[in-house]
Amino acid sequence: MTETSEQIATDIPSESWIDRFAPEVIRPYLRLARLDRPIGTWLLLLPCWWGAALATPAWPDATMFVLFTIGAVVMRGAGCTVNDLADRKFDARVARTATRPIASGQISVLKAFVFLALQLLLGLSILLQFNAFTVALGVSSLLLIVLYPFMKRITYWPQLFLGFTFNWGALLGWAAVKGELSAPAFVLYGAGIFWTLGYDTIYAHQDKEDDVLIGVKSTALKFGDGTKPWLVGFYSITVILLAATGLLANLAWPFYSGLTLAALHLAWQIKSVDIANSKNCLRRFKSNRDFGLILLAGIIAAQVIG
């Protein structure tokens, strides 16, 4: 089905705070780090907050939450830089991504690598504020960050590898509090992976026609018109694993109230998503911030009340 011009979406703002307030010389770097598009940062940050809150039998530590927030902004930017370096030739051939700073020539490959190094150094400085186990765990995630952009070339399941990468924070959050890993953290990590499989499949439906033309793969292409049953499966497993996480962590009843609301949100996504409409897909994708915040509120309420 061919979309009308009204249905074609882009998540690159035509004018944002970067255009209004940032000096012109640094605007391409801020766009490269996606600082004008915070949804990716939210989706990287929320599992960190979940893990830290799950490991804390009281109000979570505010300083730790702030450190994770800064780290998510920086490492999401680093991940985007790696992705855009790897995909610069593909991006130049796709209308939705052709204006990205590297693909359009606003930032050279050399300057992009320098910018990446600076982001990684800043990310390391944040990571070093945590215990040694968390530092080692955080450094180990770099392999996933580097490998993920290449997965779309070799498998129809790059969304799975994104899930491995974006939900590493669930392990980091738990480890930052406990100094080790145990069953609730691993089950929470698994839940996040299936959550990502759902939301990023929805996101990938925006690019499926271009992906066919340039020869890259995605779950959106693999599932095609049969996507919704897969979403039901992914999101059902997400909810089941989250419930198991609550049981393993001995969370009180407010967690399950929050989980019920979060599950209803996922059900709304499945029912209302239109995989032939890019704007619709983008809105459902972005709504996953709300899912994550609902779940976080349930975890914290259970810890405080329980």
Image (cartoon, rainbow, N blue to C red):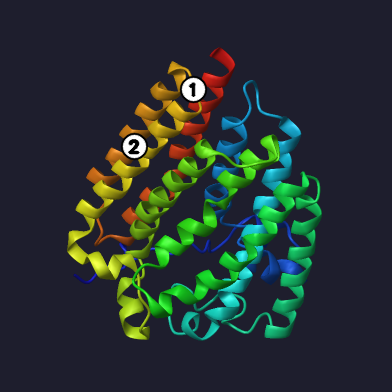
Looking at the picture, which amino acid does disc 2 mark? Ile
Residue 176: percent from the left, percent from the top? Answer: 69, 40
Q: Is residue 241 among what the camera can see?
A: yes
Q: Residue at x 22, y 66 (%)?
A: 224
Looking at the figure, which quarter contains the N terminus? bottom left
Q: Is residue 50 left or right of residue 259?
A: right
Relative to 188, residue 155 above or below: below
Q: Which residue is mark 1?
A: 251
Labels 2 & 1 near each other (Cβ < 8 A): no
Residue 96: percent from the left, percent from the top? Answer: 44, 72
Upstream in the sequence, badge 2 or badge 1? 2
Looking at the picture, which amino acid does disc 1 mark? Leu
Q: Residue at x 36, y 64 (%)?
A: 204
Asked which secondary structure carries label 2, the reply is helix
Q: Is residue 244 left or right of residue 52?
A: left
Relative to 25, residue 288 above or below: above
Examine the image and state in which quarter residue 177 appears. top right
Q: Which residue is mark 2?
A: 240
Q: Is residue 234 left or right of residue 21?
A: left
**Label 1 packing within 10 angstroms: few (<14), some (14-19), many (20+):** many
Q: CA distance from mark 2 to mark 1?
A: 15 Å
Q: Residue at x 30, y 62 (%)?
A: 7
Residue 95: percent from the left, percent from the top? Answer: 43, 77
Q: Is residue 21 left or right of residue 182?
A: right
